[in-house]
Image: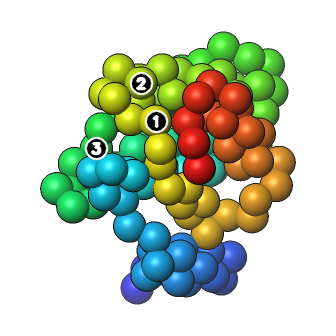
Amino acid sequence: MKSTSIKTLRREARHARVRARVSGTAERPRLSIYKSNTRLTAQIINDDKGITLASVDSSKEKGKTPRERAESAAAALAKAAKGKDVSKVVFDRGGFQYIGTVKAFADAARAAGLEF
C-alpha cells in the first residue's frame, strides 16, 4: 500500500479543484508550478495540444536562497517564452499557497514580461 501524507493529499485535492477551472490554450498557455523543499519547477503548457512549450528548474539557477533561485528561474522562463512568442499566460499555482517562493516567482515572471 502506498503511504502518502495527508498534507500531500490535500494539496493534490486543491490542485484538482484549480485544474477543473484552469486550462491552457494556444493564445494563453498555462504556467504550471511545482514547489518542493529544495526546488521550484515551472512549465508553460498548451493543454489543447498537450505539449510543453518551455520549462525551467530553479536548482539549475544561481542564487543563495530558494527565493533568489525562483526569481532567476522566472526570468529564464519568461525569456524562453518570449522566444516561443508567448506573452500572456494563465497562472496555475499547483495547489500551493500564493506566498513566499511562489509569490516571488510570479512577481519576477511578471517583471520579466509575462502577463497574468
Residue 61: percent from left, percent from top: 60, 19
Which residue is tagged 2? 82
Q: Residues within 10 Å of mark 1 (few under 14, many from 20)?
A: some
Instruction: For residue 66, say whether it is visible.
Output: no
Instruction: Write down the quadrant of residue 104 in the picture.
Output: top right
Three-letter code for the amino acid on which mark 1 is drawn: Ser
**Please, what secondary structure does the residue beneath circle 3 have?**
strand
Q: Position of residue 41 (x, y in %)?
A: 52, 41
Query: Gap in Å between the C-alphas at discs 2 and 1?
Result: 6 Å
Question: Of circles 3 and 1, which is in front?
Answer: 1
Rate crowding at label 3 as few (under 14), some (14 to 19) or many (20 or more) other CA atoms within 10 Å: some
> Which one is in front, 15 or 46?
46
The amino acid sitting under disc 3 is Thr
At a point 22% along the width and 48% down the height, the residue shown is 51
Residue 102, percent from left and from top: 71, 48
In the foreground, 103 or 110: 110
- Of badges 2 and 3, nearer the viewer stands 2
Which numbered disc, 2 or 1, marks the residue that appears first in the sequence?
2
